[in-house]
Image: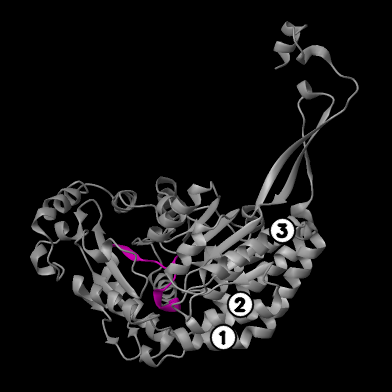
């Protein structure tokens, strides 16, 4: 895919700033017409977008509709229904000390927005923020990922056919284009991607004090207690890990499993993968492939870092990796440090009140993962394991999680009360008790990260608000003009008692 030139980027940015300055986007009727236009375009281009998703990632129409189109359509309809309410001037209480005045909160668009999306859910993650930008009254320049060229090209054609580029436009290319975009001044940057690139975006935004929303990722833990319904847990986890072949920012990344139910869970997981995708998952119509050869090789490398309990087959020709559970007790192995973004499931097991699984087992050497750990780092891992002795399973899981970066999601399977304890003592962008991923499906709740997994939030009203500035406006009457605020502060003692 050819890079959009720096000159063209500057031209679009300039034209969008000039268009925003006309005030055309301030009218809510204009915004609703543009939302309706986007909805019509999505309907007209749905089959072409679905075909592009199939060509780039082997994503079935059914999965594309559930994870991309339906979410986007629902977002647009929610904004059309509520935009008048969200955007109207809001009167708020005024204290007696400001009498005779009235106080208001006024919503105004931030201005010209830049939206950069990743490749894994290109349609949803690029156009969902766009809905918020349109709803708030901003212009938008969209930058899709070059790793899914057919999808990016199709979206570019759809947007060009639907909107004038001085209002909404798409530019294409690699990280050189990203760098050129970040050299421009924006009123808002919405970025979805890795924490490493998020830091680059934030550093660029800091030069102009530009507000940012960073939707990043991380290693989202999935805890399975012995009180869990194993069959339901296995079914939902197998679905969540094989959805988009694990290439989902809120996919369960690694497992923390009670030692007592480890074997039962592995067997149930294998059965549920078969139920979802048939006897040969590589022949499944609904199993997405790894996005490119580089991603395939990276995820395959994790297979050497533990003992395979289930799965492990790969096919370089189709870039397919079988869902795999990997027993991995080396906490400093790359598979336990890096976001996997694929169908590999490293598993850590704890026993009730006995520390790590290797400490509970009478023969830790027999169960050691097939990985060579640097000798200099081994004592540190041993010390961490030693501190867990005597702790409950819940305490061990909590301690394991809080010692790491805050994840985008956290999942727990077991008794609800125990789940709430884990939620209370940890931090994550969001999560589920006895489910995975589905918290993103409720538009009444915001979606976003915390710490290393991001900042800011969106979906439904939160999307409108993240592209909006709320102005505080005080309207004062000219009569009476009370003298107490003026020097030399007469009646100060009386006024002090009111303040």
Tag on residue 50? 1
Q: Does the magenta stretch include residue 254?
A: yes
**Local crowd at mark 1 within 10 Å, few (<14), some, or many (≥20)?**
many
Between residues 98 and 22, which one lies in front from this camera angle?
22
Which percent across, then down, holds residue 14?
64, 61
Q: Is residue 330 visible?
A: yes
Q: What is the tally of numbered marks visible in this picture?
A: 3
Residue 137 visible in rendering: no
Q: Is residue 91 above or below residue 87?
A: above
Q: Residue 28 falls in which quadrant of the image?
A: bottom right
- Mark 2–mark 1 CB contact (< 8 Å): yes
Query: SS of the residue at dot 1?
Result: helix
Q: Is residue 119 left or right of residue 357?
A: right
| Along the viewing direction, whichever of 43 and 344 lies nearer the viewer | 43
Circle 2 — which element? helix
* Residue sitting at x 44%, y 53%: 428
Q: Taking 389 as reference, is 228 left or right? A: right
Magenta part of the chain: 243-258
Kindly identify which residue carries mark 3: 20
Tell whether position 162 is magenta: no
Q: Position of residue 157 (x, y in %)?
A: 62, 81
Is 204 placed left or right of 375 in the picture?
A: right
In percent of the image, x 21 and y 63: which residue is there?
333
Position of the C terminus by quadrant: top right
Relative height, residue 90 to residue 313 (above, below):
above
**Mark 2 and mark 1: span between their CA atoms?**
9 Å
Q: Where is residue 1 in the image (x, y as percent from the top left)?
A: 47, 81
| Local secondary structure at mark 3 | helix
Mark in the foreground, 1 or 3: 3
């Amino acid at each position: 895919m050819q890079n959009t030139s720096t000159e063209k980027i500057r031209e679009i940015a300039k034209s969008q700033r000039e268009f925003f300055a006309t005030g055309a986007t301030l009218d809510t009727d204009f915004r609703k017409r543009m939302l309706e236009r986007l909805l019509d375009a999505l309907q007209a281009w749905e089959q072409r977008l679905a075909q592009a998703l199939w060509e780039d990632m082997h994503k079935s129409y059914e999965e594309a509709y559930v994870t991309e189109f339906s979410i986007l359509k629902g977002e647009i309809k929610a904004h059309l229904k509520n935009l008048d309410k969200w955007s109207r001037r809001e009167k708020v209480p005024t204290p007696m000390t400001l009498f005779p005045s009235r106080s208001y909160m006024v919503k105004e668009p931030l201005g010209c927005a830049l939206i950069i999306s990743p490749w894994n859910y290109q349609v949803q993650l690029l156009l969902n923020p766009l809905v918020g930008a349109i709803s708030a009254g901003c212009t938008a320049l969209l930058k899709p990922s070059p790793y899914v060229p057919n999808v990016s090209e199709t979206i570019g054609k759809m947007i060009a056919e639907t909107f004038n580029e001085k209002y909404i436009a798409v530019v294409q290319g690699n990280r050189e284009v990203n760098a050129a975009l970040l050299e421009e001044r924006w009123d808002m940057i919405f970025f979805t991607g890795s924490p490493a690139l998020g830091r680059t975006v934030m550093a660029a935004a800091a030069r102009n004090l530009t507000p940012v929303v960073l939707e990043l990722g991380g290693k989202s833990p999935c805890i399975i207690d012995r009180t869990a319904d194993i069959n339901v847990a296995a079914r939902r986890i197998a679905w969540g890990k094989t959805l988009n072949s694990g290439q989902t920012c809120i996919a369960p990344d690694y497992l923390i499993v009670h030692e007592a139910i480890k074997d039962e869970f592995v067997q149930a997981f294998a059965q549920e993968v078969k139920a979802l995708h048939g006897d040969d998952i590589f022949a499944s119509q609904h199993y997405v492939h790894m996005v490119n050869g580089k991603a395939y090789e990276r995820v395959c490398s994790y297979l050497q870092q533990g003992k395979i309990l289930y799965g492990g087959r790969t096919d370089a020709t189709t870039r397919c990796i079988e869902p795999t559970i990997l027993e991995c007790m080396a906490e400093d192995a790359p598979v336990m440090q890096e976001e996997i973004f694929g169908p590999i499931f490293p598993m850590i097991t704890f026993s009730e009140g006995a520390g790590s699984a290797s400490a509970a087992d009478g023969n830790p050497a027999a169960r050691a993962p097939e990985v060579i750990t640097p000798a200099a780092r081994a004592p540190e891992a041993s010390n961490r394991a030693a501190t867990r002795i005597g702790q409950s399973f819940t305490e061990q899981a909590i301690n394991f999680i809080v010692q790491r970066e805050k994840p985008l999601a956290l999942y727990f399977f077991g008794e609800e009360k125990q789940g709430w304890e884990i939620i209370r003592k940890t931090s994550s962008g969001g999560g589920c008790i006895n489910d995975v991923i589905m918290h993103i499906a409720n538009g009444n709740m915001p979606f976003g990260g915390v710490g290393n997994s991001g900042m800011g939030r969106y979906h439904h009203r939160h999307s409108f608000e993240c592209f909006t500035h709320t102005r505080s406006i005080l309207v004062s009457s000219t009569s009476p003009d009370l003298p107490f605020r003026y020097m030399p502060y007469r009646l100060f003692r009386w006024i002090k008692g009111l303040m």
